[in-house]
Structure formats: C-alpha cells, structure tokens
Amino acid sequence: MDGLVEDLKSLLPYLRRYRRSYWVGLAAVVFGTAFQLGSPWVLRFAIDALARGGSPRQVALYALTFVGLAALAGIFRYLMRMTIIGASRWIEYDLRNDYFAHLERMNPAFYHRWRTGDLMARATNDLNAVRSLLGPGIMQAASTILVALGAVVQMFSLDAVLASIALLALPLISVVVFRLMRRIRLLYDQIQAQYSRISEKAQENLAGIRIVKSYAAGSREIRLFAKANEEYVRRNLKLAKVRGALVGTIEVLAGIGILLILWVGGHRVIHRHMSLGELVAFMSFLAMLSWPMIAIGWTLNLIEQGRASWIRIQQVMQEEPEIADGPRTDFSIASLRGAIRFDGVSFSYDGAWVLRGVDLDIPQGAAVGIVGRTGAGKSTLVHLIPRLYDPTEGQVRIDGRDVREIPLAVLRRCVAIVPQESFLFSDTIAANIAFGTDGSEEQIRWAAEMAGLLEEIQSFPQGFDTLLGERGVNLSGGQKQRVALARALLRDSAILILDDALSAVDAATEERILRNLRRIMRGRTTLVVSHRISAVKDLDFIVVLDEGRVVEMGTHDALLSFRGLYWELYQVQQLEESLSAL
Amino acid sequence: MADQDYREEEILGKAYDARLMRRLLQYLRPYLAEAAAAVVLLLLLSLLQLLGPYLVKVAIDAHIARGRVAGLAAISLLFFAVLLLQFAVEVAQSYLIQRMGQNIMRDLRLEVFGHLQRLPLSYFDRNPVGRLMTRVTTDVENLNEMLSSGVVAIFGDVFTLTGIAVVMLWIQWQLALVSFLVVPFLTVATFMFRSKVREAYREIRVRIAKINAYLQENISGMAVVQLFGRESRNLDHFRKLNYDHLEAFLRTIFYHAVFFPVVELLGALAVALILWYGGIRMHAGSLTIGAVVAFIQYAQRFFRPISDLAEKYNIMQSAMASAERIFRLLDEPEEPDFRSPAIRPAVVRGEIEFRGVWFSYNGEDWVLRDVSFRIDPGERVAFVGATGAGKTSIMSLLTRLYEPQRGCILLDGVDIRHIPRDELRRNIAVVPQEVFLFAGTVEENIGLGNERISSEAIRQVAEALNIHEMIEKLPRGYREDVRERGSRLSLGQRQLISFARALAHDPRVVVLDEATSSVDSETERMVQEALEKLLAGRTALIVAHRLSTVQNADRILVLHKGEIREVGTHSELLARQGIYYRLYQLQLAGLKVERPVEGESSAPSSEAASHAPATRA
Ligand SMILES: Nc1ncnc2c1ncn2[C@@H]1O[C@H](COP(=O)(O)OP(=O)(O)OP(=O)(O)O)[C@@H](O)[C@H]1O
Ligand SMILES: Nc1ncnc2c1ncn2[C@@H]1O[C@H](COP(=O)(O)OP(=O)(O)OP(=O)(O)O)[C@@H](O)[C@H]1O
Ligand SMILES: [Mg+2]
Ligand SMILES: [Mg+2]
C-alpha cells in the first residue's frame, strides 16, 4: 500500500468531477447497510412474537415491516450502484477521451517509440482495471469497512478485553497483507506488460496479414503468438498463487481471532468473568467480521491492479510532446505567405546525422525539386517544414519567422503535404479528399480532377461515396496515391509539398497530373521530392541531396552542366530510354 | 457494417443461448479433471466451513458450559488444524480454477488467432484491424470473470439450491409451496433482465470494437491527422463512439441495479410469506415455532445462492455476448485450401498460365476480363498498364490471395487450386506494391523467421542487392530494430529490404509489383544488374510504371481496364504503335526539357530561378 495515495493522486481531478455521485453513493452504502443489518432484528421480533403466540395480524405486520426494510435496502442498493458504478463508467469515458486527445498531441517521435498494440492495450485492458478500482473497488471498500466497523464497535461494547484479543492478529495481518500486496502489484504489472506483447503481436500480424499470407508465414506467427500466450498464462498463474495466499492468509488470521476468543473467552466463562450468552453473541459478531475480511482481500487486489494499470496509463499520459505551441509561440501570426528558409539545419533521429548544415532559400511562390538517392534525407528535410520533427541544429524559417514561433495550427493549415506513403482512412472517398477541410462537393470534384482521378472515381459503382477499407485497401496503389494528392490539393495552402507523390502512377497519368499541377503551383511555394527527373526538371530550381548535404542546386540545365550527381541520375534514366530507342 | 452484423445476430434469439453455452463448455473438456477436482475441493471447503462452527458449538456445549478446562486446549488445536486445512483447500481450489480459466482463454486466443491466419484476404478488406484485435484480446479477456469465478461456482449453487428445495418440501410441503410462490416472479424478472441486459452487452461488444478500430486507425495515421489539422474533429468522433459505448453500459448498470435488489426483495417476500402463513398455521396449532424458525433459515439459505446466481448471471450475460462475437468469427469460412487430389509438384519449374480468368472483388464489377497468358519457366515477363488496370490483382490471384470467379490459373500445368496453399506460396515470392516491414530486426524481416534461411544467405542477398552497406551503417547493422512498419528506414530502404526478403526465400517464381518505385534510378540500375544474376532460372513477373524497369523483359503484357491488349517484346510493341508506344513516348518526352506552354508558365518562375544560385558542393 506504500505510496498508494501518491500513485492515485492524478485520478483525483476525475473523481472530483463526479464527487456528487460518489457522496450520494457512499451515503447509500451507509443506509443500505444499516437497513440490511436492521432486518434480522425485525425477524427476531417476529419470531419472538410467534413464540409468544402473537396474533397473525401482529406477525403479518412484522412480516410487512421486514419486506419494507428489504425494499428500502434495495432502493439504497439501487442508488449505490447507479451512482458509484455509473460514475466509474463516466470516468472511464473521460479517461478514454483524454487518452485519445493526448495521443493526438503526440509527435511522430513518440509513435516511433511506442507500439500501436501497446497503446491499444493500455486504452482497453488497463483502463478497465482502473475503472474496476473506481467502481466496484470503491463500492466494495466502503461497504466492507462499514460492516467491519459495525462489528468491531459492537464487539467492543460487549467486552473490550475480548475484543482487543480478537483484534490481536490485526497487526500481523497488515504486515503479511502489506507484503503480499506489493508482490501482487509487481506480478500484475508484469502480466499487463505481457498482455501488451500479445496485443502488439496481434496488431502487427493483422496489419501485415498480406505478407504473412504471401510468405505462408502463418504457422510461424501462430508459434510466436502461442509463446507470448504461454508466458501470459504463466505470469497469471503466479499471480493466482499469491492471490490465493492472500485470501487464505486473511481467513486464517481471522480464524486465529476466533481461536483466541474460544480459548480466552472459554476460560473467562469458566471462571465466571462473563456469561455464556455474551460469549456466543460475541462470536456471532466475530463471524460477521469474517465476510468483510474476505472481501478486504478481494478489494485490495482490485486496488493494486487498478493502481498498477493507472501507472501504466500515466506512463503514456505523462509524455509531453516536444513539438507543441509553447512560450515562444507568437499567436499573432495568423497566416503565412510561404517563403521558406533553411538556416544551417542539421538533424539526427538518434545519433547519426541525417541532415547536415542544410542552407536553402526558397522564395515565396517558387517551385523547387528535391532529388537524391534513397535515404539521402529528402523526406526528413520536408518533414521539418510542418514540424513533424524539429531540427537538431539550425532553424527552419517561413516568412522569416522560425517555425517554432508559428502556432502549430497556423503552420499546418498553411502547409499541405502528400506523404510518401499514402495513408487513407476507412471512410468514403469524398470524405478522404475533404479530410481537413470542409470542401464542397464542387471542390472535391475539382481536386479529384486535378489529381487525375475523376474519371476513375466516376466509374466506381458508388462514385465518391465508395467506402474505403482501412488504409484504402480496396484501391490500387496509384489510386491511393492520387486520393492523397487530391486531399492535399483541396487544402489550397501557401506551401505544397509532394513527397514522391507520383511514384505509383503511369506515365500518361503522370503527365496529365503534372500539367494540372503546373497551374496549381502558380503563386504557391511548392516542393517536389521525386526520383523521376521528369517530375522536377521544369521547376524553378532543383536541390540535390546526398547523405544529408545539399551537394548541388540550380536549374535543370545548370545542374546538367555540373556533371555531378544530378547528371548521373539523369544519365541513368536517359541512357535507358535512348538505349531502348534503338 | 458492424451495425449490420449486429442486427443479424438479433434474429438468432433465444435458442442460440443453449447452443452458445454448450459450445463454450466444449472448451472445458481438456480440463475436465481439473474442473472435477475444483468442484470436489469446493464441496470439501463448504464442509470444512461447517466444521468450524460445529467445533465451536462442541467447545461451548461440552467444555465451556460445563466448566471443563481440560479439553478446551485440544479442541482449540483441532479447530486450528481445521483452519489450516481450510486454508490449503481454499488456495488449491482457487488456483485450480484460475489455471483452468487461464488455459481456456489461451486456447481461445490461439484458436481465434489461428483462424484469422486462415481467413481469406477479402475478410481483412472488410474488417478493420482494431475490430479483429478486439476479438482476440478484449473479448476473450471478457470471459475471464465468468471462467474464474463463474462456471464452477454455478454448479455449486445449483446443487445447493436443489438440495434445499428438496429438504424444504420434505419438511413441510405446504409451507414450502407458499415460499415458492415468489419463484414465478423471479423467473419473469430474470427473463426480462436477460433480454434487456443481453441486448445491451451485445451492443457494448460492437461498440467497443468500433472504438478500438477507430483508435487503431488513428494511431497508425496520426501524422496525417495532425498534418491536416483534424485533431478536434476526430476527437469529436471518438467522443461520440465512446459515448455510445458508455450509454450502453449505463443501461446495463440500470438493469443490474434494478434486478439485483428485486431478487433480494423477492427473497424477503418469501420469508415474509412464511412468517405470515406460518403465523396463521401456528395460530391454528398445526405448526410449531421450531418448524417456522427452521423454515425461515432454509428459505434464507435458498435465496442466498439465488442472489449469488443473479450476480453471476450478469457476468455470464456479458461473457456470452463476447462468446457470441468470438464464435461468429470462428464460424467465418476459411480460405479454401487445395482441392483433392492434392498435387505437390516435386520440383516446380515455374510455368504459369492464366486461362480465361475473370475476376471481381465484389459482384459484377469486373477488374479482370478474360485474361489469358502463358509464361515459360525462367521467362521474365513485364506487366504494364495504367493505374487501376488490374496488375496487382493478377499477382494476388496467382498466390491465391483472392479466387477468380471464372477461368483457372495453372502452375506447371496444374490448377493451383489443387496445390496446397502454403506450398504454392512458398514457391512464389512477392515484393508487394505496398511495403510492409514488421517491428523487429532487419534480419528477421528478410528471413521472416524461416529456419531454412541462414543469416549467411541473408547477407549474400543483401550484398547482391547493394543494400549490405546501407544495413551495416545502421547502429546495430542487421540486428537493428526497424520499428513498427519499418519506420526507422526511409521508404526506399524499406522497399529494398522487402526486395531482399523475396529473393532470400529462394522461390521459383518472383513477383515484383512496383518493387523499385520508391528507389532512385542509380540504385534501381544496380538492382537491375543484380537481378540478371539473381533471377537466373526463375520465372519473374514484373509490374512497373517506369518503362526503364521493364524494357529488358523477355515479353511485355499491356493491360488496359482489366484486359490484355498487347503482348510482345519492347521493340515489337514500339513497332505496333499502340498503348505501349504512347506510354513510351510520354516518358521519353518527360525527360526532354520542355519550355512551358505559353500562358501556363508560372509567373514567379524566372524570378525564382534567377534568385536561386546554381551551386555545387
Ligand atoms: N525515424 C527514424 N529514426 C532513425 N532513422 C531514421 C528514421 N527515419 C529515417 N531514418 C534514416 O534517415 C535517413 C534519411 O531518411 P529519409 O526518409 O529522409 O530518406 P529519403 O531521402 O526520403 O529516402 P527515400 O528516397 O527512400 O524516400 C535514412 O538513412 C533513414 O534510415
Ligand atoms: N481489395 C480490393 N477490393 C475491391 N476493389 C479493389 C481491391 N483492390 C483493388 N481494387 C480495385 O480493382 C482495380 C484494379 O486494381 P489493381 O490494384 O489491380 O490495379 P493496378 O493495375 O495494380 O494499379 P496500380 O498501378 O495503381 O497499382 C482498381 O479499380 C481498384 O480500385
Ligand atoms: Mg523519402
Ligand atoms: Mg498495383
């Protein structure tokens, strides 16, 4: 129980939000328990009345009272559940929303560290354990403590000496329980971690099911999954043992109390220090204690699990995004024109430099090509503009302002990007194109047309209302890419970034799109990353990256005259084309 | 879609319950011995629990009441021994039940996961990852409570219930019948509760799956969500899904909060009835006070397991809703395997033939129309065509990821439907258009855990593909964790790893679906050169938009709107001046510096160009 308060403190704001429910619920627990404890008395009076030969009417009255009490107790139990369990569900709802909102603030670097399956496990299984703590846990704890307290008070009022003896075992109980609880928490934490492994495995397997199938890797996957499951079972059984020990220990210790009473009380009765009746009454109260004792074991278990899970959720919630609006943000910036400058920008993901001393000046409205070998750092470079990452050294400026001073929302509204890997959502095609804008039907059609997609979409039976599967699985590679392109075009922003956005389309379509783009690019700062010389050669100038450095820069003709990397790349493409012309 | 599933289930109705339970009990079968032991221990436990009070009674009656100190120590010790035994039995019993529950859940998870591996790809097109994950993890976990606290205890409860009922009838049948008067009400209450709460629990299962699917999708595509500033709208949507889930749960809480007290109230009513009726009978002198007291105690014992059962009933309803979902998935028909007679070609030569293949993903929306072609062993054939023409679809049919509606596909003259699926796929390696790397090392991603692929072989392939150096440059080389989906690498690098994966598997047939689309031309040329060696003796199907990639192929097939329009070598096709020729001209023109057509010139272009200094590092 060490540090319990510390660990659960961060839950307080949530509890506070529903404190009315909790107070009403706790009051209901008190009254419900009171009425429940009262009904045996009524029963006793009724039986006494029967024994005295009371009239049936009198007995019936008692019977009615009995039912009445039960009904009252029932009403309070109803209230108790509705308020406390209800509040716990509301808190679960709040927590899940907050978790999602938190994830929405996290940067790519975070998602690079955390596995999707793990994040999902925390949002489901751990959240559930926390909810159990807040609902059944609190409810159970309250009623347990109440019943126990009632029994103890009655015991003390009967015979203080015996009562103290009966509770002699209590310190012993707390020491043992304390130790076991700690162990339970540790084990439970390991269990949840393993559950995350299972969830990760399932998530990856399902996401990559095409590869698994194509390579007939199913049986291997099953083997791996089974291994993760075996470990999960093993850890659970370890916990089961400790849990059993906890419940058993508490029961035994409660039994020792009875034993002591029997022994000491017996002597006292024999020596006429107390009456037999008192002893019997005393023991019945002690028996009343044994149920809460068991319930305590169960409740403590819930609490420790909830606590371990809450810590796991907190591990996610306590991560702070490195990229967010901060004290440097100048909120007076409401729009951008789109002149981009890289000032001595170096960047590393984790040690090795990916970009080194990049200096670039892209005037507003210019169209710039970026080429370079695979892994040269092109995607990294363009990702610095909408601040998916921040440079490790140097600055990226837009309109002369460091991007870190521009409100993130403004920055991203002014930058439209077609990522190298198209990610579509399971929604209609229209909704995917209008993602991030409130584009009218007209505009959506326009964007689709610009992306060379209109005819194809119209040939689908449901047209723009065609529902896409996850990641757009039911589109062809080129169709996906063009939906992503249309999505970016519709944003109509000052800066347009195409990261290898035409790699999956054929020459005819590419040509058509490039022609459209030329019109769209007018007045917009455009960055075109491409492996195809054809996509960049007509642009204002071209930047050649190699191993994170800008090695060449200039117009197509100028670059060719350098006879450097660009010329080489051009030659490779050129050579083959002309070779084949033979 | 989930909604539709959900409605379908409603029709299944009540008869389904028994079936569901029976099916669930099947999973107990391997653990029958354990279950039996647990029940025996449970009985033993209740016996021991009775023994304690009995010993107390003896101590009081025989010793304390008579003032005899002598035997008190002995009986106290005996009491203590019973206590210890009780402890041992308790621990053993709860452990057994837990073990059984955990084992059953593991069995279920493995079965669901295994079944998923055998479902056809079209199933995954329809079902989001998050939903399927929910089935494997959360839904199975939802059975935990029932398995670890429910099933066995229910037997115990039902057992005591019947026992007490019999005893009550035996002692005083009239009184017994009077107290049983409440049973019909109990039945009605239970019935109403069941139908309501079950419905709610079913909705909960559907809704939690929706939440998880949405969560999964958003986590995967978070960068896009943020870049397009969709955070608040997506949060709103998530809130809505989350609220639907909450709302269903609040309903169950309401039903439960009503049902549980009602059951207790009915118990109290039974006692009251006994009091009332007993009072009348006693007044008439036909009943003793002892009988009434005894009867009341029995009635209370009768209702204790009932309210216990009510609690478990609730747990069970929730578990059943999950079981329903799980079984539904398990009932999905598996991907068809081979038709008998199974034919396992000893050595695959790699001859491929499509014979009048018609294919559509759904209904009459033909993606491939009457596609026929033949590829000789060792031949290198390229597929060219506009995007969406059906190239990838052809490749998917070849490995039986989908099944054609008409026509057949032959490998070495054998209909692939007669070849065991895994065998077929082992012989055909695919570099898919969409790269997928698993979280794990580079080495694992290339070998995919296949024992037959040594790390030697992996390095050789990497060297041949010119990616050895790139891999060695990673901090941990081949042991570098590439992270989820390979996010540690650039897309081109990922594609090359995926390429290496296919070749490392040493297949007879290689399918390269846009396998170098994200790779620079120089690297691509090196790969091409390497392929000359690597593809020797293998049949290769190459899909590419960059004609430079395909022009060296032995034959080129031009696909247009799902039909094969042109077939021939590069020069033959050029000579035909058809579709291929047009594509070729376009690509050629693309490399020529064309001055923008007047009026289309971007205004600031010349200014910007002059602004940008031509530099060379
Ligand atoms: N998240 C990451 N963590 C660590 N290293 C990374 C990460 N992403 C990329 N890299 C490394 O940074 C380098 C540049 O990657 P980047 O994606 O910018 O290349 P690129 O020029 O876009 O290549 P391609 O043409 O293949 O798309 C690569 O060597 C890559 O391995
Ligand atoms: N899983 C699917 N479910 C439904 N329709 C699909 C699915 N996959 C592809 N399609 C549709 O089938 C048609 C052919 O797609 P396919 O992927 O075979 O094209 P492709 O020739 O490979 O195109 P690309 O060059 O763009 O990759 C497209 O119109 C596409 O929308
Ligand atoms: Mg890139
Ligand atoms: Mg394709």
Image (cartoon, coloured by chain):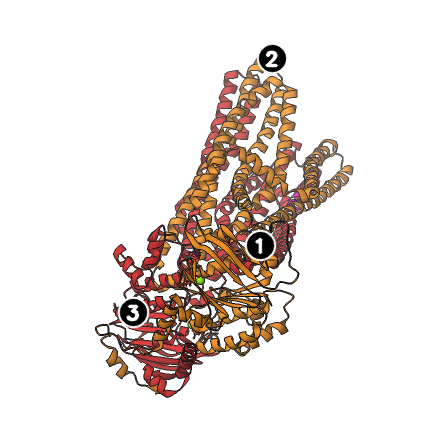
Chain colours: A red, B orange
Q: Residues within 10 Å of mark 2 (few under 14, many from 20)?
A: few
> Marks 3 and 2, how far apart in space?
107 Å
Q: Are marks 2 and 1 on the same chain?
A: yes
Which is closer to the viewer, label 2 or label 1?
1
x, y percentage for residue B441? Answer: 56, 69
Residue placed under numbered mark 1 in the picture:
B415
Q: Secondary structure at mark 3?
A: helix
By secondary structure, the bulk of the magenta-drawn segment is best described as: helix
User: Mark 2 near mark 1, Cβ–Cβ under 8 Å?
Assistant: no
Q: Is residue A253 magenta?
A: yes
Is the N terminus of chain A in the top left, top right, bottom left or bottom right quadrant? bottom right
**Magenta stretch: includes residue A28:** no
Q: Is mark 1 within 8 Å of ligand 2?
A: no
Q: Is residue A505 visible?
A: no
| Residue behind mark 3 | A515
**Callout 2, which amino acid?**
Gly
At label 1, the amino acid type is Asp
Position of residue B520 relative to residue B74, above or below, is below
User: In the figure, B218 relative to A374: above or below?
Assistant: above
Quarter holding the C terminus of chain A is bottom left
Q: Which residue is mark 2?
A: B285
Q: Residue A336, image x and y in percent? A: 26, 71
Q: Secondary structure at mark 2?
A: loop
The numbered mark 2 sits on a residue in which chain? B
- Residues in magenta, as a range: A250-255
Give ligand 3's quarter of the image.
bottom left
- Chain hosting mark 1: B
